[in-house]
Amino acid sequence: MSARLRIAVQKSGRLADKSLDLLEAAGLHVVKGANDLLFRVENAPIDLLRVRDDDIPTFVADGVANLGIVGRNVLLERAKPEDGPCEIMALGFGRCDLKIAGPLGFAYDGPRSLQGLRVATTYPRQLSRFLRENDVEAEIVTMRGAVEVAPRLKLAHVICDLVSTGATLEANGLAAFETIARSEAVLIQSPQPLDPQFAPIVESVTQRFRGVTASRDAKYVMMNAPRAALPRISEILPGSDAPTVTPLAGREDYVAVHAVCQESVFWETLERLKAAGASAILVLPIEKMM
């Protein structure tokens, strides 16, 4: 195979390092190129195009890149719904929310509170959709950065911006009122026809990403328990399908219980399992899962 699959990733910013970490966790060994724009995967026919996050949807839509890793907020803002890239899967990192926020004394009582006001944002398309869906007429002030200072500078009454921890809002005397969209890193694919030779590579990459994402917070839980306690233990195990149950040698009334838990397993969970009759409880990390 002479051609190489192209994946567009963020060159710098909050998703850049975690995108590379995802590739490495999926067993794709990235080698830095002679310049910062092109990295290569040494153990697969894959090149990484490192570009601005705002350009990733365009690169993927036009077929310059076959796949891309980008925030859903950027995808919704930059891609055209009719011929844009399709989202293949959420990747579980870079989570944040697009929120309406304003000064602490602002009396917000739902979207109608924005009627006739000026709203500053770097996401005019999503804000416009939100206003239209709620039958609100407001003036959108498009900014390219530092949106949180708009109310203080009298450029706008309120803002619509991405919020992660809320620390930036708090530092500028603002509070979030309503979430209009939720975002995280997503894997997207070009709408352009895929070269048949790339199909198995895309399938492999997608399966590996799913495995990494599924195993990131998953735990493997093992314990011994009375057979009669199985219904209660199944209820307690967080985010688990039906556990695997095997009899213990020499103990007809006891079984070994193994389960993959997709949610966090806290000390309180172990205490509840023990109170239900479980013993010898082990919680192990999962390195890979498919």
Image (tube, rainbow, N blue to C red):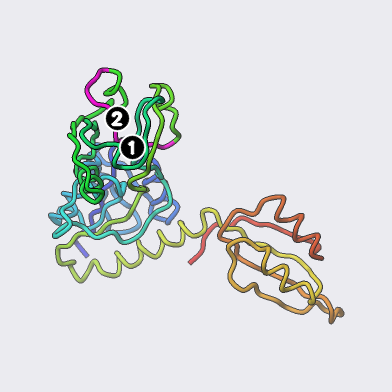
Q: Is residue 163 above or below residue 27?
A: above
| Residue 144 screen position, x and y as percent | 21, 30
Quarter that holds the N terminus: bottom left
**Amino acid at the residue labelled 2:** Val
Work out how far the residue at label 2 is from the one at label 1, CA to CA, in angstroms: 7 Å
Secondary structure category for the residue under label 2: strand
Residue linked to disc 2: 158
| Residue 273 screen position, x and y as percent | 75, 61
Residue 56 in view (yes/no): no
Q: Is residue 223 above or below residue 135?
A: below
Which is nearer the N-term, disc 2 or disc 1?
Answer: 1
* Segment tinted magenta in the rendering: 153-164
Name the residue rendered at 82%, 75% in the picture. 254
| Residue 143 screen position, x and y as percent | 20, 30
Q: Which mark is residue 100?
A: 1
96 relative position to 220: left or right: left
